[in-house]
Amino acid sequence: MAVLARAGNVVSISSGQGHPGEEVTIEVSLANDDAVSAAEIVIPLGGGITLVNGSATLSDRSNGHEISAAMAGTDLRIYIYSMSLTTLNGNSGVLCSFSLKMGDVPGTYNLTPSVVLSDAAGQQVASSTQGGQVTLLAPDLELVTTSVDFGRVPIRGTYTKNVQVRNIGNEPCTISEVLFDNTDFSVDNLPIIVQPGSTQNVTVTYRPVDRDPGITTWMTIISDATSGKKKLYVNAIPYSVNELRVQRAEGIANTEAEVSIKVNNMEPLVGMQCSFILPQQLEYVDGSVAAAERASGSTAFASLDGRKLTLYLYSPSNTAWTGDDGVALTFKVLLNGTSGSYRLNPTDVVLSNITQENMTSATYGEYVVISAPKFSGATTLDLGVTPAIEVAQATYTMSNTGQTPLTIDKVIFLADGYEVVEQFPIVIANGQSSSITVRYTLEVEGAFTTTMNIYTDDPTQRMVPVRVSGEKFAPNTLVIEGEKVNGGYDLLFSMNNWTSDLTAVQMDVHWPADMTYSSVTKSARLSGHEVMVIPLGDDTWRILVYSMSNNTISGTEGELFTMHFTCSTPADYIGTIVTVDGITLSDTRSVDKYSGEDLTYEIPFLLGDVNADGSVDIADVNTMIDYIHGYYVPVFIHKAADTNFDDEYDIADVNGIIDIIHGNK
């Protein structure tokens, strides 16, 4: 059994580098403790490097040895041997060398040998190895972007796309040229240098001139990369820009607005067609479609199917429009709606060239903006309660909450007797208000009502109905007056009546108990009536005026009757107050027609006339002084005595009487 020696025998491989096609010399060294007479060395080289045939040579350590070096697949096999089994000279140093031819794939290739050493007896001796490496220096380029698609682009524009490339080599890569099959494509800013391990953009510029349904071209990148040219596809669809644009239109409600259709085109155009679904607020004005100046030789017409409006423009002579931008066609719409923006979106658009191709590339809609007035006002108007002989009236306020002036054309009432004072038309600015005076002139009694129709140019409220109501009452009133008579005082009762069929009167008269009722005298207005006075107490008398045959009281104004009262002294009545309540004026149907209030009548007095003799003089001063001193005075009118109105009777009132006598008060 053979036993391997445990000595230090190391085979090492040197390193080197080179460019594609160059030859690099590699040395094999041996440091050996044992005597070595033969060696077998196998080094895997990979696919990018190969042996230069005949390049393997022995060093001076050879002692009559031979060397054989050849490729076996991708392995380099080196054999060193001696036919006489002599051992190698020395114990260290280069054993042999060989040359490697660099390929074209950059990178670092490891030289990792496997070694078999044997002694003179043919026995294998222990060994170890130290590998080397060889570096192939070169740029290499790979495509990160494998294709470019510009998509649909308008002609006569400039567009760019980036192609990413990566240098997977270990030296800078120079892109010197980029070629295209189509001259509309180009790459500027050449040369482009891509550092090792870096990614860089190659910017492709596209300047299409002619439209095309679709193009594909080769892009060829030429560089100093070992991998050679790189090629990729570039796609694009260049189209002619022919756009139809509806122009914005504005107007006031109830007027017409003109809508323009603008076309910007690169292709010579001879005709167009488009449709709109008209909003309810827009009404096509029949016959309003017209060719614009740039299409002056063309014929325009329209068709309307329900709400769908279709417009046509064509050239009988197939003549192209002038220019490449501007209005091609106009039409009008009636603005029949309230304030707002209403969109016109074109559909079924055709922009035809001379060969009848539809060259439409894009369409754009727009708004028709309506500015309109907006009526605002109450739905009812109350004229209130008014005497039948007076005109009932009230103010009605109208506001314009819209965007343009509001016109009130007229007002019509659905019944007679009503009128408006103001003149029409009335124009109300936007954001403002205006009023009209509504009157009811008929002399009638009872509730009344009608409808007032207000006619406006508000597109949503052409006619505004307003309920007008009110009430008229019969103005039947009583008047009470007084008159001093010898030994007493008379109360005169008059009646002003609008109702002509009054037959009876009832009232309660209240006066101080010091007044003694004596009699009543009726006027000629009560020739067919009786007047009854019924005492209800010391200070109350009920008056009844009636006719057994239900006769009406004659006339419409004047005295009815006079009540006569007696008294001991004028002090009994001067300055007192007569009140009348419970008043009823009955017509032939026993309906109360009294429209007045309860009556109050103050018996007049002369300030300072304390003794009620009808004048203010020294006698009143004396009476006042006597009263203050507590002496008996036969007559003392308190209201006349209180000249300073402080509800007290003193020297100040005496001075007041003196001032009245002297005309100072």
Image (cartoon, rainbow, N blue to C red):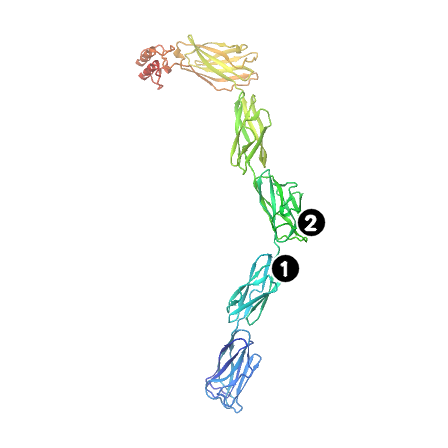
Mark 1 or 2, closer to the camera: 2
Nearer-the-camera pick, 437 or 385: 437
Q: Amino acid at mark 1?
A: Gly
State the count of labels: 2
x, y percent for residue 300:
66, 45
Whether residue 286 is situated above or below residue 413 in the rendered picture:
below
Q: Amino acid at mark 2?
A: Ser
Determine crowd level at label 1: few under 14, some 14-19, many 20+ residues with C-alpha closer than 10 A. few
Nearer-the-camera pick, 47 or 223: 223
Specify the quadrant of the image occupied by residue 302: top right
Does residue 178 show up? yes
x, y percent for residue 635:
36, 11
Q: Secondary structure at mark 2?
A: loop
Whether residue 288 is situated above or below residue 387 in the rendered picture:
below
Whether residue 296 is situated above or below residue 427 in the rendered picture:
below
x, y percent for residue 598:
47, 19
Specify the quadrant of the image occupied by residue 209: bottom right
Q: Residue at x 57, y 68 (%)?
A: 222
Q: Are marks 1 and 2 in contact (CB under 8 Å)?
A: no
Single out the residue that lies furthest toward the top.
Answer: 486
Nearer-the-camera pick, 256 or 45: 256
The residue identified by callout 2 is 317
Q: Secondary structure at mark 1?
A: loop
Q: Decide which of tag 1 and tag 2 comes sooner along the chain.
A: 1
Quarter of the figure that contains the C terminus: top left
Does residue 362 show up? no
The residue identified by callout 1 is 214
Q: Is residue 163 left or right of residue 540?
A: right
Nearer-the-camera pick, 385 or 139: 139
